[in-house]
Image (cartoon, rainbow, N blue to C red):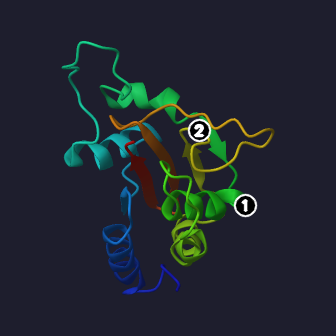
Amino acid sequence: MNPHLPGELEALRELLADWTSHQNFDMVVAIGEDRGHDHARLCWEALEPRGLVSAVCRCRSRCRGPHGARQLQDRLGVRVPVAEAADWMALTLGQSLVFSSLGAVREARVLAEPLVELLGPDADWRANGYAAHPPPYGHNVSWSPVTIWTFDAALVGIGGGRTVVAVATGED
């Protein structure tokens, strides 16, 4: 699939919609035009309409999720090299963060590669930590939450005139 060809981008969006509706965990994948927003604003705009973030804290205890796009900036602090972005994307799209299941990662690669290709070789990819992808040294899985859910993994890219936001969530 070449997402740069006419009709292929719409086909990719349809495949992603089908993929996300059939997973055993919640996921958001948004493809957009580059409007000059930073990674944090793109992530907020993809999550806020779906109720995955809250601009106002209504709880009595410490909230995990951010309360605005500005709070997301630091949370998307892991720079992902373009050469590794397809692996990160496949892991974000293809696994449950709650049950440590990697069952669909191989199948997710079919979607991950065109998403990364869409942004091109000079894309700037950011993640919120290592919830979906193992850290380079060690097995400590850590991340900075970008949603109100217990677990989440975000991968946000900008490049080639397009943007991609992928966020998997889980609740135990």
Amino acid tagged 2: Gly
What mark, if any, has residue 129 been given in the picture? Answer: 2
The image shows residue 16, relative to residue 144, as above or below, that is: below
Q: Look at the numbered disc 1 and give the secondary structure of its residue.
A: helix
Amino acid tagged 1: Ala
The residue that disc 1 covers is 83
Q: Look at the numbered disc 2 and give the secondary structure of its residue.
A: loop
Residue 64 is drawn in which quadrant?
A: top left
Residue 96: x percent and y percent? Answer: 48, 56
Question: Residue at coordinates 79% horizontally, 38% vertically from top-left?
Answer: 138
Residue 86: x percent and y percent? Answer: 63, 64
Question: Residue at coordinates 64% horizontally, 42% vertically from top-left?
Answer: 79
Report whether 132 appears left or right of 54.
right
Report whether 99 appears left or right of 31.
right
Q: How many neighbours does mark 2 have within 10 angstroms: few (below 14), some (14-19), or many (20 or more)? A: many
Residue 29: x percent and y percent? Answer: 38, 60
Q: How many neighbours does mark 1 have within 10 angstroms: few (below 14), some (14-19), or many (20 or more)? A: few
Q: Nearer the viewer, residue 170 or 9?
A: 170
Question: Residue at coordinates 42% horizontally, 31% vertically from top-left?
Answer: 72
Instruction: Specify the farthest residue to the top.
Output: 60
Task: Tell me, yes or no, whether the two marked residues, 1 and 2, touch with CB atoms within 8 Å.
Answer: no
Report whether 64 appears left or right of 85.
left
Question: Disc 1 versus disc 2: distance between alpha carbons?
Answer: 17 Å
Residue 47 is drawn in which quadrant?
A: top left
The image shows residue 85, relative to residue 2, as above or below, that is: above
Q: Nearer the viewer, residue 105 or 122?
A: 105
- Check the picture and name the quadrant holding the C terminus: top left
Q: Nearer the viewer, residue 118 or 29?
A: 29
